Each structure stands twice: as C-alpha cells, then as structure tokens.
Image (spheres, grey):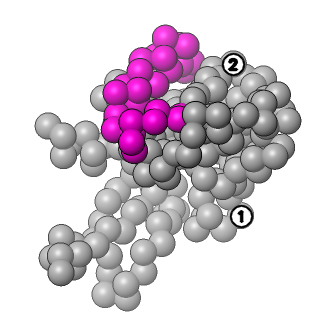
C-alpha cells in the first residue's frame, strides 16, 4: 500500500555501512526517477552514482547532516551510507523546474524503501567543493545529494505536541523522533 511505503520512507541518517549497494540497484532507482513527471517534459536532471568507499567519503565530506541534532556532523564510521546519488541539472538542456528535483528524489527514495533500503535527501552541500572532488563539468549544476543504504536506526513518527515544536530529535537510546502535524491541522 502506498501509505505504508510513504511512512516507511524516512530521512535516515545512520546505516549499516558494511552492507554494500550494487550499481544495478542505483541504476534501478534512477530508472524510476526517469519516468517521473518533469516540467514541460524538459528532463534536465542527470545523476552521478557512487557505491565505492573512496568516492562516498569525498561526497560525504561536502555534506551537512541533521541540522536539529546539535553537535552531530555526519554519520560515524560504520554508520555511513553505502551509496550516494548526486542529482545534477544539465544547464544545456534548458531551464528546469525546482519541483522536478523533489519529484525525482521522492521517487528514488520510495523505490529505495520498497527494496528495504533507506535514504536521506541532502540539500546542504558544499557544491563547489563537490564539483571539484568529482570533476563535474560546469555544464552541470548540483541540485542535491541522496544518501542510500540499509537503515540502522529506528524512527518514530509522533504528533506535534501542544508547544508546536517541529524539531526532530534523538532520545537517550538514539531513537529518532519526527513530529508531524495532525491532518486536521493542515486542512484549511
């Protein structure tokens, strides 16, 4: 059921790093995104795939993870993602629409969830550094990075408390809590 898949698709930030992701799996996920809607059908998105440790470390060095978790910069060694998909916009393909990025990323993450994997969409990227590290041509603009791996953390969705605080947090057992608004609170 789609609702179960959407609920299962969380922003995971801790993974079983030793469980490798095959290149074929990454290709299958990008193939799903290829079929997603695209504004004016321009299809300007391109993808850089990584499933080797050296390239993953380069990519991870340019990311800022979990802004609400103070002092938490990145997944620790042993809990890093096994793969990354760097989403790029091909500037020669014409102007793209920003919603294309979200649609494609969500499609990739839902595909990952269906395969028992998890991921995290990261927009806080040192794009200039990442372009240099990966030798990405100026023809391409980095949109975002999607981390992929087998999730190692438990995430609990809960209702926002009366205080209205929307910040996710980790408890003393490292369980990740994500407050969500009630349906009746978002309908106008």
Q: Is residue 129 visible?
A: yes
Percent coordinates x, y for residue 65 in the rendering: 64, 53
Instruction: From the image, state whether disc 2 or disc 1 is nearer to you.
Output: 2
Please report contact status of discs 2 and 1: CB closer than 8 Å, yes or no.
no
Q: Is residue 79 visible?
A: no
User: Closest to the observer: 55 or 97?
Assistant: 97
Q: Give the quarter of the image for residue 92.
A: top right
Question: In the image, which residues are magenta?
Answer: 17-45
When the figure is inspected, residue 176 is found, relative to residue 28, above or below; the finding is below
Tag count? 2
Residue 46 part of the magenta-drawn span: no
When the figure is inspected, residue 24 is found, relative to residue 143, above or below; the finding is above
Q: Is 183 left or right of 139, judged from the image as shown?
A: left
Mark 1: secondary structure = loop
User: Closest to the observer: 111 or 140?
Assistant: 140
Circle on res. 71:
1
Q: Check the picture and name the quadrant holding the C terminus.
A: bottom left
Q: Is 85 left or right of 168, judged from the image as shown?
A: right
- Residue depicted at 78% across the width and 36% down the height: 138
- Residue depicted at 78% across the width and 30% down the height: 137
Q: Which of pointers 2 and 1 lies earlier in the amino acid sequence?
A: 2
- Residue depicted at 84% across the width and 33% down the height: 133
- Residue depicted at 14% across the width and 37% down the height: 1
- Bin the neighbour count of mark 2 within 10 Å (Cα to Cα): few under 14, some 14-19, many 20 and up: some
Mark 2: secondary structure = loop
User: Which residue in the structure is indicated by mark 2?
Assistant: 52
Q: Is 29 left or right of 137, judged from the image as shown?
A: left
């Amino acid at each position: 059921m789609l609702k179960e898949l959407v609920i299962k698709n969380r922003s995971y930030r801790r993974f079983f790093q030793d469980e490798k992701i095959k290149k074929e799996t990454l290709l299958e996920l990008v193939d799903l995104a290829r079929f997603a809607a695209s504004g004016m059908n321009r299809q300007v998105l391109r993808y850089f795939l990584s499933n080797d440790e050296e390239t993953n470390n380069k990519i991870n060095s340019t990311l800022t993870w979990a802004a609400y978790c103070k002092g938490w910069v990145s997944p620790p060694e042993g809990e890093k993602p096994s793969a990354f998909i760097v989403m790029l916009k091909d500037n020669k393909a014409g102007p793209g629409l920003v919603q294309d990025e979200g649609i494609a990323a969500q499609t990739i993450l839902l595909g990952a969830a269906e395969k028992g994997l998890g991921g995290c969409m990261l927009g806080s990227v040192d794009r200039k550094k990442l372009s240099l590290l990966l030798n990405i041509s100026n023809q391409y603009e980095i949109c975002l990075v999607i981390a992929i791996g087998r999730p190692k953390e438990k995430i609990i969705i809960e209702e926002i408390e009366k205080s209205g605080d929307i910040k996710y947090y980790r408890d003393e057992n490292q369980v990740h809590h994500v407050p969500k608004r009630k349906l009746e609170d978002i309908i106008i």
